[in-house]
Structure formats: C-alpha cells, structure tokens
Amino acid sequence: MAKDRDYYWVEYVTPVEETELNSWRLFQAGAPAVEEVDVPGDPSRRILRVSDDSKELIEHLASTLPTLPCATGSAPDRDWDVWWRSQQHPIEVTPHLRVRPPWVETPPRLNTLDLVIEAKMAFGTGHHESTRLAALLMERHLPAVRPCRVLDVGTGTGILAMYARHMGADPIGTEIDPLCLESLRENWRNNGFGEPRAALAPLEALRADRPFHLVVCNMIRTELWPLREAMMERLAMDGVLIFSGQLASERQIVLDWFAEAGLETLEEREEGEWWAVAARKTRDWRP
C-alpha cells in the first residue's frame, strides 16, 4: 500500500462460537486477511477486522454479514507488513514445543522443539488453542510401539506431523487444499525434516490395510464428522484417536458417538471455548 494514502477497515462483532464460520465467510467474500480481536470484558464475543487500501472492497465486505454489528472507517496508511512483523513473537504451544516465524529469533531450550513456521495459505501457526490441545494430547498418548504410524488428518502447515516425527513416530498427513502444499514443503525442509509425507487427496485414498497407531484430526466438528468412518477404518485396534478443534459446547455429541463406536476416552482437555479428547479404539465400528 502507498504510504501517502488512507487505508480502510471494517469490523464485525461475532459470537465466539461463530468466529471461524464468519471468518470463512469474509474470506469467501474477498477479504485478504481477517484479524481476530477479543472484546474487552466479554469472552462471549469477538471482533473480526479487515483492513485494505481498497474502499470498494471494504464497502463490499461491510455488507457480507448483515446480521452482525458492523463498523467501518479509515485511517492514515503505514507500512503494515513491517508493523505486523514487529508484533510477532515465539508461541509456546506446549512446554516442549515452540513455534516462531522465520524473522523472530529465540534462544534454544533443553528438551524443546523449536519449529520455524510461516503459515502463508495454510492453517496452523501454533497460536490457536486447538493446536495446543492436540499437541498436549499427542505428548501424553503417543503409543510406545515403534515404528509408530501417525496419521495427521488435514495437516495444514504440518506442525502436528513434524512434532510426531520429533517424538520418534512415522507420520503421514492428508490435505485437500492444494494451496497448503508449498507452505508444507517449505516448513518441513526449513525444520530439518526433509520432504513431507503427505497426500493431496481425500482420507479415503490412503490404504486401510496398513492401520495407524495414532490418528489426530484438528478440525471443527462439521468438517470432521463425515470423516469418522474413514478414520476408524485406518486406526489400528487399541490405537489412539485424537480430536481437537471441537467446541466445548458440543462435547457430549462427540462422547455419545464414542460410546456408540467403542472408543474408550483417555483424556479430555479444554481451553476457552475449545475442547479436545484422546480415546482408544476397542472394536470396529460401522455407521
């Protein structure tokens, strides 16, 4: 953006449980990026903010979510890329896993994996609670069998798959978004893990006769739910299934399915509105 021009912005106030859905709607409408900001003193709501030098784009986005409170405005421009980079810092995903962007340095720490991640068009920089919950459950429930085959469903930037590799497992990822592939390859190479083992294909494309000892899926329930049968078919008996990215308000829906599918709950974790769970497969399941 030219520094002698104004930039324009639009802000929506969304219920927390609809944050991801409304962010997705803004992206679909043409938003180049969506910033999430907490509403001070109100954990039930969140602000979605889009800034751009195109007044026409902001006016278009201001009509995208007509049922939500909306505000627009403008301000003098500045070098947003430099400002944004200056605000970044290492993220402590777990006590043994940190993630930082390439331009941020951090001193090494004993027994801690430092991953250099630039998300670009892929999901996962370690900021999100669901990534943290999934990584914590992986630390505690990664099967001791070696080689331990791990399936990372919707691998995104590859954080969980690389962490599984660091812990001695043999991970494979699946992804259906081709825009993730460049970021995934770059992240694996930059962190010393070589070429990623990932399939740009639906989960069903993986052979079911070579089961995995751990399957991890960090997706919201509406995306995860149709994949349950394929995941169960590829999970070894007594293998561990980790679901993250679940709303805490939908916890009982997942646990009811666990009872139906013969999954023994090992541990639950919750952070803010998000909930994650690890379970052991005790029998085969078909819907």
Image: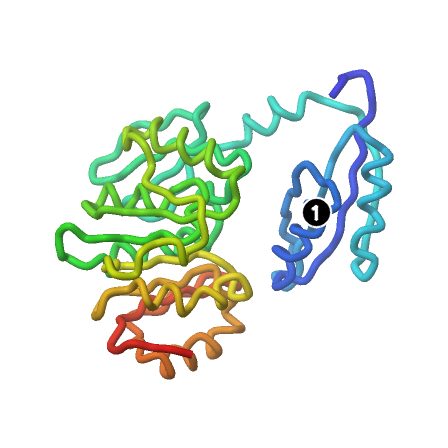
Q: Residues within 10 Å of mark 1 (few under 14, many from 20)?
A: few
Residue 238 x %, y %:
21, 70
Give the image location of residue 34, x and y in percent: 66, 43
Residue assigned mark 1: 28
Q: How many marks?
A: 1
In the rendered image of this protein, does residue 96 appear above or below residue 195? Answer: below
Residue drawn 70% across and 47% down? 28
Rendered-image quadrant of the C terminus: bottom left
Taking the image as shown, residue 57 lies to the left or right of residue 235, namely right
Kindly identify the residue that appears in the image at 39 percent across and 57 percent down: 133
Per the image, label 1 sits on a secondary structure element best described as helix
Give the residue displayed 18% in from the left and 45% down from the top.
168
**Amino acid on which the number 1 mark rests in the picture:** Gln
Looking at the image, is 116 positioned above or below residue 28?
above
Tell me the residue at 32%/59% (across/down). 215
Which of 118/85 is in front? 118
Foreground residue, 134 or 272?
Answer: 134
Which image quarter: residue 281? bottom left
Left or right: where 19 falls relative to 240: right
Residue 197 location in percent, x, y? 32, 40
> Viewer-proximal residue, 210 or 87?
210
| Quadrant of the image occupied by residue 101 | top left
Indicate the quadrant containing the N terminus: top left, top right, bottom left or bottom right. Answer: top right
Name the residue nearer the viewer: 173 or 201: 201
Q: Is residue 105 above or below residue 19?
A: above
* Position of residue 61 in the picture relative to residue 265 (left or right): right
As drawn, 54 above or below 260: above
The image position of residue 48, as x and y in percent, is: 69, 49
Q: How is the image coloured?
A: rainbow
